[in-house]
Image: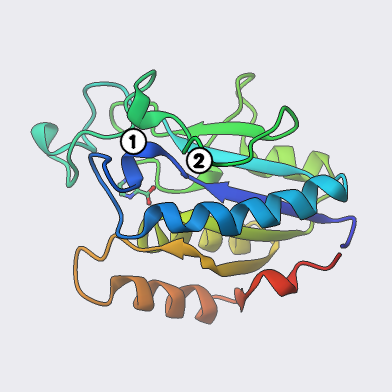
Amino acid sequence: MQAKDALILVDVQNDFCPGGSLAVKGGDEVVPVLNRAIDKFTAAGLPIFATRDWHPEKTQHFKAYGGLWPVHCVQGTRGAEFHPGLHLNKDVVVVSAGMLPTEEGYSGFQSTDTSGSGLAELLHRKGVERLFVGGLATDYCVKHTVLDGLKEGFKVLLLVDAVRAVNLNFGDGDRAIEEMTKAGATVAGLEAIPS
Ligand code: VGL
């Protein structure tokens, strides 16, 4: 493990898992894979960030108000909670996105912690240079987080066994992986996490 690595868990929330209001097929399958990544990062004392979609009840992100999506991840609801099987611990920093009624909030880099600091700033403060990214969903929040991470100057590894796609259109997930790769991300398995 290198001292400048961080793990980014993207939106592993109940509403994106089977039974949730915007369920991603196999969404819960990312949990055991991410838990192994969390255990490795925790053992090495390296930073872990968990992003979450954290919407108000009325937002242009939802169909009823002109957006694409069914109601999901409304602040304070069970659907907005992290999947109960995810090994979150007190050292994991939670950052929230999509809190404004006018904001889609697809990118983890639009997320802030409780004091209002953005993800890029939090990563820079810890001297992070390389991100390992997994979570939900491949074709939305994972993709935007990876692309923005690259734009911010981080090296980015996509933990490909730990992502699942919404696939509103057939093949969206595969196209998203291609787009991330073209932009400079590396597709990797858990073995890419040095221990
Ligand atoms: C997401 C669709 C709508 C995601 C969020 O977390 O990828 N997808 N809102």
**Is the C-beta of the residue carrying label 1 under 8 Å from the nearest atom of ligand 1?**
no
Residue 49 position, x and y percent, is 65, 41
Q: In screen coordinates, is 136 left or right of 79?
A: right
Residue 95 drawn above or below residue 153: above
Residue 88: percent from left, percent from top: 64, 36
Residue 146 horizontal side relative to residue 97, left or right: right
2 and 1 marks in contact (CB < 8 Å): yes
Q: Quadrant of residue 174?
A: bottom left
Q: Is residue 57 above or below residue 175?
A: above
For the residue pair 13 and 95, the one nearer the viewer reads as 13
Q: Secondary structure at mark 2?
A: helix
Q: Quadrant of the C terminus?
A: bottom right
Say which residue label 1 marks: 103
The residue sitting at 63% across, 40% down in the picture is 87
Disc 2 crowd, CA 10 A, few/some/many (<14, 14-19, 20+)? many
Residue 101: give x, y in percent of width and height: 29, 26
Which sits earlier in the primary sequence, circle 2 or circle 1? 1
Q: Which residue is painted at 85% across and 56% down in the image?
A: 4
- Mark sitting on residue 116: none
Q: Is residue 144 visible?
A: no
Q: Amino acid at mark 1?
A: Glu
Task: Specify the label residue 110 is tagged with.
Answer: 2
Identify which residue is drawn at 38% across, 30% down: 80
**Amino acid of disc 2:** Gln
Quarter of the image for the N terminus: give it: bottom right
Q: Could you give the CA–CA distance between mark 2 and mark 1, rounded to whole angstroms?
A: 10 Å
